[in-house]
Amino acid sequence: MLLDVIAALAIFALAAFVLMPRPRSGVGAAELSGEAVRISGEFRKARVKALTTGGVADVMVDPGNKRIQVDGANPISIRDGVAINWVTSDRCPIRGGTRALRFLADGRSCGGVMTLSASGRAIELRVDWFTGRVEMSPK
């Protein structure tokens, strides 16, 4: 009788262990999209700053340290597990060792493409040089 109870408890504990949810490792699709939305928001913030001040506004991108900063604002950090590939035109200024995304007073920019990737997924942020528009699409 006691052996039956112990066996039943062992089976129940084993089933609970197998069925228990486990924390995910890595960055999921929702987290990657969230990072892309935050970064595109920083790009848009810089464009609005250039339009409202009538000057230029730069977005410094530091892929090595995973930081992005609009002139005069606090930097934002990209979460661990997200890889950044940053490509701009040669018309973008070099700031802090990498090319910064520059927005002009009329809303145009020097243009750039940022690819964020994690866990086999990728999202591309494209900043149009002519309009300054920021587009986000899965890659």
Image (cartoon, helix red, strand yellow):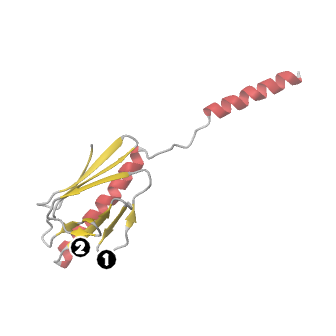
Numbered mark located on residue 72 in the image: 1
Numbered mark located on residue 105 in the image: none
Q: Among all residues in the image, which is located at the extreme front? A: 97
Q: Residue at x 38, y 65 (%)?
A: 76
Q: Where does the N terminus fall, quadrant-wise?
A: top right
Which percent across, then down, holds residue 13?
Answer: 72, 32
Tell me which numbered mark, 2 or 1, is placed earlier along the sequence: 2
Q: Which residue is drawn at 37% across and 40% down?
A: 120
Dots 2, 1 in contact, CB < 8 A: yes
Q: Which amino acid does label 2 sit on?
A: Lys
Which percent across, then down, holds residue 22?
Answer: 57, 40
Which residue is under mark 2? 49
Please state which of residues 32 and 48 is positioned toward the viewer in this rendering: 32
Q: What element carries label 2?
A: helix
Q: What element carries label 1?
A: loop
Which percent across, then down, holds residue 46?
Answer: 25, 69
Which percent across, then down, holds residue 113?
Answer: 22, 54
Q: Residue at x 17, y 62 (%)?
A: 132
Q: Nearer the viewer, mark 2 or mark 1?
A: 1
Mark 2 surroundings: few (<14), some (14-19) or many (≥20) residues within 10 A: many
- Residue 41 lies in quadrant: bottom left
Q: Which amino acid does label 1 sit on?
A: Gly
- In the rendered view, does 51 fall on the left or right side of 69? left
| Number of numbered markers | 2
Q: Which residue is drawn at 88% across and 24% down?
A: 2
Q: As displayed, is residue 34 above or below residue 139?
A: below
| 3D distance between C-alphas at marks 2 and 1 | 10 Å
